[in-house]
Image (tube, helix red, strand yellow):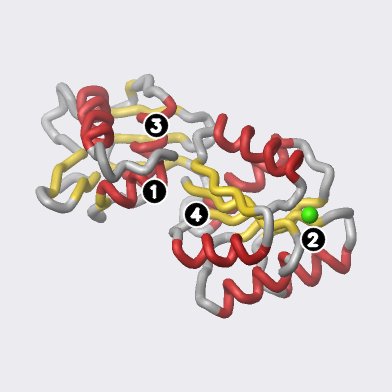
Amino acid sequence: MRILLVEDEIKISNFIERGLKEEDYIVDAASDGEKAMFLAEINPYDLIILDIMLPHVDGITICRELRKKKINTPILMLTAKDRVRDKVKGLNSGADDYLAKPFDFEELSARISALLRRNRDDKTGILKVADLELDQLRHKVKRAGKEIPLSSKEFALLEYLMLNANHVVTRTTISEHVWHEDFDSFTNVIDVFISFLRTKIDKGSNKPLIHTIHGKGYILGEE
Ligand code: CA
């Protein structure tokens, strides 16, 4: 999951970024509105955290502009104080949720998970493909009822594949949503992690779920 964090206060920005990275989100940080607009237009984010009070262009304007450009990424706004006016303005400008400063990281993290789930039919946070189950909240994976321990990177990769079940995902989109590094020069890192996942998820099953689409990428599904 890739998040754009727009916050000009360096301390708060660092605090949020560190916490999100510990939870295996990919984070791009922008400290002003112009950079935020630029990044949001060129990268496919899963969520945007947007502070209202920013230099040059404020968060409300950014939010409106993004929605005008049909960028429908969920937006969580940060308001300086518990100001009702800011909340109303934020939500009217197209934001999906808001959080008043100061906040605990845990609260932010819970709001983010809720927003990422909101756009899906299933609100339980449990992704299912055939007999494979992934619990996004508890970070647990089961195949045929048996728990499978995964490293945090393997989990993030499997989660991304399951969110896109039955659709081909390319190495480029995987690297954008699951890895921090730019993989242009050594994309076989992804192949290596796919093979780790195959060993853990598919080995011993007569119905493999992870498939290679030659020249394109990977697909997770029954066929
Ligand atoms: Ca600010």
Q: Does the closest atom of ligand 1 sit within 8 Å of the Cβ of label 2?
A: yes
The residue where tag 3 is placed is: 155
The span from disc 2 to disc 1 (Cα, nearest Å) is: 28 Å
* Amino acid type, label 2: Met
Residue 46, which numbered label? 4
Residue 176, which numbered label? 1
Q: Is residue 49 above or below residue 58?
A: above
Closer to the camera, 81 or 56? 56
Callout 1–callout 3 Cβ contact below 8 Å: no
The span from disc 1 to disc 4 (Cα, nearest Å) is: 11 Å
The span from disc 2 to disc 3 (Cα, nearest Å) is: 35 Å
Question: Residue 153 location, x and y as percent?
Answer: 40, 30
Instruction: Classify mark 4: helix, strand or loop.
Output: loop
Horizontal placement of 156 versus 119: left or right? left
* Amino acid type, label 3: Phe
The mark that comes first in sequence, 1 or 3, is 3
* Amino acid type, label 4: Asp
Q: Residues within 10 Å of mark 3 (few under 14, many from 20)?
A: many
Closer to the camera: disc 4 or disc 3? Answer: 4
Instruction: Classify mark 3: helix, strand or loop.
Output: helix
Q: Residue, x 88% and y 64% (percent of image)?
A: 84
Closer to the camera: disc 2 or disc 3? Answer: 2
Question: Residue 58 location, x and y as percent?
Answer: 74, 67
